[in-house]
Amino acid sequence: MVKFLKNCSINDRIRIVLSFVLLISVTSFFIVDIIVVQRLEGLTKPDNSYLTFILIVAASIMNVIPVFFKKLSFLVIISALLISFGIGVHFYLTAFALADLSTGVPFFTNSVGNAVLISSLHLTYLSLFVLCDIGCIILAFRKD
């Protein structure tokens, strides 16, 4: 493994780190969503967190494949697209709690406190996903 990392370019190393950060963050989001958000009483928002999880895990795997197989370098752009789709689904989930906060009426959540909790959790993970997506897009068009 050490010999392999010595032969990798800086782009490949950054790509491995980005994929690892994506996997850790989307897994922690999914666990937190299942443990905290889904157990709150009176939520009427849809649960598409599994779709965010599937899209970002697939994207992080596709992001690492070109490190090992150089001929499949086009997968980096597909990876950035999948992350973008995952961000869209995640923002859709965040919008329900943000609507409750902006109007002050707990329509999708049963209280404003739950809306604050859900929106802060979702916005934290949304910012992580956006930063990783920007990194993947930069690496897709950067020369070795």
Image: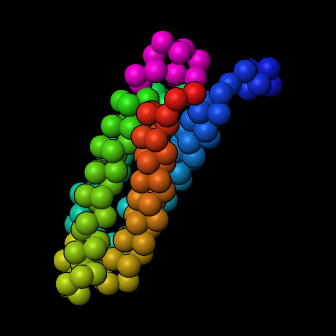
Circle count: 0
Name the quarter where the C terminus is drawn.
top right
Instruction: Tell me if residue 105 comes above or below residue 15 in the rendering.
Output: below
Residue, x 25% and y 66% (percent of image)?
95
Verify whether residue 94 appears in magenta: no
Residue 46 place in picture, x, y as percent:
24, 57
Residue most extreme to the bottom: 104
Q: Would you identify the image quadrant in which residue 14 lies? A: top right
User: Looking at the image, which is closer to me, 41 or 9?
Assistant: 9
Boundaries of the magenta span: 65-75
Report the residue at 29% width, 72% height from top.
97
Between 103 and 3, the one nearer to me in the picture: 3
Q: Position of residue 134 (x, y in %)?
A: 44, 48
State the residue in front, 76 or 35.
76
Q: Is residue 117 left or right of residue 46?
A: right
Residue 78 in view: yes
